[in-house]
Image (cartoon, helix red, strand yellow):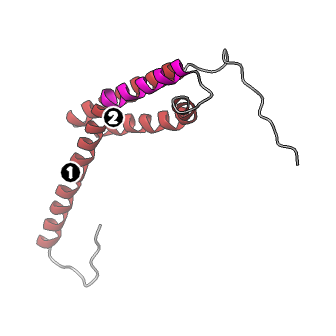
Amino acid sequence: MAPTLRPRIPDTLRPDPVAEIADFVARLADDAGRAARAAAEGRARDALLAAGSMQMLLRARGDALREALSAGRSARVPPDVRAAVQAATLAAASGPLAGTARSVCTLAAAARVAQAHRDAIGEALRARAPARSALRITV
């Protein structure tokens, strides 16, 4: 069986990998900032929408981002482009994405604390409620 050849895509039609990474990081950091501000202000719905926006961004741009990141490891990419992609990746990981990771971890911890608080209140209410029947409904 003859090997199938992939058609070569001209470089003019390929997106700039450095611009692709920078745009993705900027949008992700913006959504993470919106989620953190909404959570800090007690607007759970807005925080959830911003987190959903982050997931949609990752799904929508995942393939393009993977291709841009692979340009930093590919021997077929010119060395100057490879170095620029690696520098952009390192700058994003140490800059905006590090802050995004911290804010997402803070949001997750706050959600766990709030859930534990609600669970404790529910247990206390169930303990104080008189038992009306043998069948006890728990939520």
User: Within the magenta stretch, is there residue 82?
Assistant: yes
- Name the disc covering residue 70, or none: none
**Which of the two residues, 65 or 10, is positioned nearer the viewer here?**
10
Q: Is residue 136 above or below residue 105?
A: below
User: Within the magenta stretch, is there residue 102?
Assistant: no
Q: Give the percent coordinates (x, y) of residue 67.
A: 57, 32
Question: Label 1: few (<14), some or many (≥20) within 10 Å?
Answer: few
Describe residue 16's horizontal placement relative to residue 92 as left or right.
right
The span shown in magenta is 79-97
Q: Give the percent coordinates (x, y) of residue 4.
A: 82, 40
The residue carrying mark 2 is: 46
Describe residue 30's horizontal placement relative to residue 14 as left or right.
left
Which residue is drawn at the image coordinates 27% and 32% (left, top)? 99
Quarter of the image with the C terminus in it: bottom left
Q: Give the overall secondary structure of the magenta segment.
A: helix
Which residue is drawn at the image coordinates 72% and 23% (left, top)? 9
Instruction: Identify which amino acid the numbered label 1 is placed on.
Output: Ala
As drawn, which residue projects farthest toward the bottom? Answer: 134
How many discs appear?
2
Question: Label 2: few (<14), some or many (≥20) within 10 Å?
Answer: some
Q: Give the percent coordinates (x, y) of residue 128.
A: 11, 71
Q: Is residue 43 above or below residue 127?
A: above
Describe residue 117's horizontal placement relative to residue 81 as left or right.
left
- Regarding residue 34, the answer to whether it shows in the image is no
Residues at circles 1 and 2 in contact by the CB criterion of under 8 Å: no
The residue carrying mark 1 is: 114
Which residue is drawn at the image coordinates 75% and 26% (left, top)? 8
Instruction: Identify which amino acid the numbered label 2 is placed on.
Output: Asp
Of labels 1 and 2, earlier in sequence is 2
Q: Give the percent coordinates (x, y) of residue 85.
A: 48, 24
* Residue at mark 1 to residue at mark 2: CA–CA distance: 17 Å
